[in-house]
Every structure is written in structure tokens, then in C-alpha cells.
Amino acid sequence: MTNKSQPTSRRRYDDACGTALALDLIGERWALLVVRELMLGGKRFSDLKADLPGISANVLTQRLEGLEEHGILRRARLPPPASTQVYELTEWGYEAEPIVQVLGRWAVRSPEHDPTQWISAVSILLSFRTMLDARAAGDLDAGIGFRFGRESFLGRLKVGALAYRRGPFDEAEADVVFDGVPGALAAAVYGKVPFGELEAAGTLRVRGDTNLARRFTELFALPPKFALPER
Amino acid sequence: MTNKSQPTSRRRYDDACGTALALDLIGERWALLVVRELMLGGKRFSDLKADLPGISANVLTQRLEGLEEHGILRRARLPPPASTQVYELTEWGYEAEPIVQVLGRWAVRSPEHDPTQWISAVSILLSFRTMLDARAAGDLDAGIGFRFGRESFLGRLKVGALAYRRGPFDEAEADVVFDGVPGALAAAVYGKVPFGELEAAGTLRVRGDTNLARRFTELFALPPKFALPER
DNA sequence: CGGCATCCGGGAAGATACTG
DNA sequence: CAGTATCTTCCCGGATGCCG
């Protein structure tokens, strides 16, 4: 109820509403996308910069500082010999995944959504978790491998949920492996572009159980568009 | 997959990720709070400005234009004699409520959350819907009236959900009526401040079934704080 | 008074270059 | 690789004024 006192700090809403506080914490430009990129595991500065095309180094520095101050991420030093620094989410930071999901689920109904634009590896994997139709998945139990350049993830589909483990995996752990650029995988799953076309273009390779791969693409569907009124 | 083309427009992320698009749509400063304020019904320009302390008229104008262009709200003209203009959410705009909720639920776990700050009528009512413990509510079926100055709402609690109808209501429709400033209601519900104290301060009046009023305050609980590591 | 348009100062974001 | 330094641009916030 204290109101009209001088602003607490830089540019805050000074509102008891939790939503307003969330915007104070992660509402600055790029902040939530930094969180998104860390959602499947810690990353180094330069990886973040590479996976967030358009961000500049100084803005990334500022966002990392702010998110650390607010307790959303922390700096960690990898054990030697790779004693480089990574940024990783705190436990509370990981709990922001529903924010990423609910925003995405709402926004893809916009006519302005353009699935042909650039997409990051983490984004496409998170989108699978967001858009997975648990009913369509049924009791399907499968290991799905993903290779994007040097990054790889092993997905585990089970009881209508999808869990990821980042890092190298053994071919035997995966029933099917997708290897390519994230956008091609998006085209296959959301654009229903046939694998053959993507393989011919050299953007995606599918190895292992091809039937499962096709089945996998049928577990996801974008929600219906919102109809813009004519103006 | 089109990447590195020249930016589509002013300051967009140009990312196929739905989360990034959501930030393009409602990520500008104040935008989501405008949406929040319209979540329980349309408002006029000056009401929005009054309920969003700190926003300036020109920024409000810009946000309203942007949200209208994106199909999130529309201008509507009230029927005569009150032939004034109001801004109201589109159907898709109303579907952004989960965004407001999930952000709020996540952020109140921050040690920086300060429930003593200003809060708007719409915010506190939405927070009830967000924080309602359906199990605690059980099969409680009750009409709860809210009066904030000249604004009034009738809440209907039923099967663990809370629906609102804005506008004047008959005393007979409400089993209990809260009349006061939003912050006092927040103090009663989330701060567990006794009604007597607030009545003495003149910030809240409770009429009707006082036992139900007390019961109502017990249906909500803020989630546990996230423990900030010492630094 | 409601709904803007306009002007201005400060500050955040963006681009580029540079350093340990 | 992981940032810092610098410069420019643009957005935000505040004030004023117009016009129905």
C-alpha cells in the first residue's frame, strides 16, 4: 500500500502484483531468452551469444549480471581440465520453464508467427515438450536422439512426457536419431515437410527406426490460429 | 531457417520460437500490465492510466496501438448515452490469462517480492484466481462481493474455481462483501492481517458472513520463497 | 475531461572495436 | 574466449498543449 514513494531502483514497476515483479526480474529485453537457452543446461558466454542471434556482448553481460543478482542463474566453473566458466540456472530459474511454455503456446496462435525463421536447438527441443500431445503419445516409450552440430541430446519419451539429457549418447540408447539443423527438424515436425525433402537438402538426417521418426512428428500440432479481424 | 536477413521491423527477435514471438507481441514495457488490467473487462484510457501508476500517457497510447495491431485488444464504443471509448481484449487476448498467472506464481517466490506495495483491484482479484487452493476450497459454493471505490465485482466460488462478474451487484447475491482498498484485502488474505485491524484503519470493511470471510482468506497461500544463496 | 501529438532529457539497447 | 569501452540510436518517462 505504500505508493508514490520514490522509485525503488532503476526502472521497476513498484507493484505488489507478482506479474509485475516477474517483469522486473525477467522482463528486460533478451532476459527471458537467456533463461530459455539455459533451460536444458549451462552454457558459456560465447555459446549464449551464438545461440541468441542479434544480442550484443554488452547487453548479454548486463542480462547475466541482472539474472545472477536476482537469483535466477549462477556462474559455475567447470572442473579442470575444461576449467572454463559457464552460466547455469538455479533451481528457481529452472522453474521458469512454465513461463517459457505458456508464452510460446499462446503466441504461436498469432498470424505473425513465422516458423521459417531461425530457431535454436534448445528452442525446438523445449517446444516439443510444450506441444507434445500426451494423448497422442499414449504409452509410447522411446529414446530419441538429437544431434545439432557438436551439441547432442537424448530425449526420453515416456508416459506422455519428454525428458532430455544433454551430452553425448550411445547409438544403442536411441531408437531413432535426428541429425541436422534445428530449423529442419521444426519443418519436419510442425511444417510436416517429408524427411526425404530435408535429407535431399542436406539439412536433416534420420537414422534408426524411421517409422518411429514419422510417428514422432505426429505427436505435435500447432494450436489453431487466432483470426485477425479485417481492418 | 531464414536467418541473418535484414530485421523484419523495428526491434524484433526474428525467431521462430513462440516464446520470442510472445515477447515481440507483449514484451515491451507496460504491455502485459495493460493486458492484465483489461483481463476482467474493458476500460477507458484514463482508467488504465490511473490503474497503472507510473505509466505516461504517450507510452500508454503506444502500447494500446501496438496491442491493437497485434490483435490482442480492440477499441469499442459504448452505446449512448455513455458513448465513450473503451479498450477491451479480444478473445485471444483473454487467453493470455495463464501468462499473467504463471508469471505471478513464479515471481512471488522471489525474496524481492514486497506485498506492501501498491496493488490494483484487477491484480488482487486475478491473484485470487491464481493462488486459489482448489483442495482447500473443496465444494464450497459462495458469492463474494468486492467493492473498490466505484468499481465492484461479484465473485462466484464454485467447484474450486473463482469466476468474476464486473459491475454492480445486489447485496442478496453475495454471502459476504469486502469493501475497501485492494491493498487492504491483500493484507488480509496474504498477510493474514486480522480484519479488525484493517477495519480500525478504515481501509477495509467486511459485511455479511464474517465466518465465510475468514474461511475465504484461508483458501490462499503464497508459495515458499526461493532461498537466495549468500554472496 | 478523454485521447492523443509534440518536445525534451536520460538511459537502455545495438553495433563495432578493442583488450586480457 | 570472455568480456570491456565507446559511440550511436532509439525507447521510455515527464511535461505541455491541442482539440473534440
Image (cartoon, coloured by chain):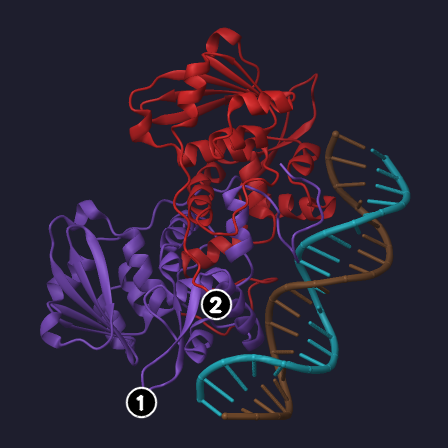
Chain colours: A red, B purple, C cyan, D brown
Mark 1 surroundings within 10 Å by alpha-carbon count, few (fewer than 14), some (14 through 19), many (20 or more): few
Looking at the rendering, which quadrant does residue B89 occupy? bottom left
Q: From the viewer's perspective, is residue A92 above or below residue B214?
A: above
The kind of secondary structure element at disc 2 is loop
Please name the amino acid that badge 1 sits on: Pro
State the residue position of label 1. Answer: B81
Task: State the CA–CA distance, disc 2 to disc 1.
Answer: 26 Å
State the residue position of label 2. Answer: A231
Q: Position of residue C8 (x, y in %)?
A: 74, 79
Residue B229 located left or right of residue B83: right
Looking at the rendering, which quadrant does residue A156 occupy? top left
Q: From the viewer's perspective, is residue B18 above or below residue B53?
A: above
Q: Are marks 2 and 1 on the same chain?
A: no
Please name the amino acid that badge 2 sits on: Arg
Residue at position x 44%, y 61% in the image = B72
Residue A2 located left or right of residue A9: left
Q: Chain of mark 1?
A: B
Residue B194 located left or right of residue A223: left
Residue at position x 50%, y 44% in the image = B18
Q: From the viewer's perspective, is residue A114 above or below residue A184?
A: below
Q: Chain of mark 2?
A: A
Would you say residue A41 is visible in this rendering? yes
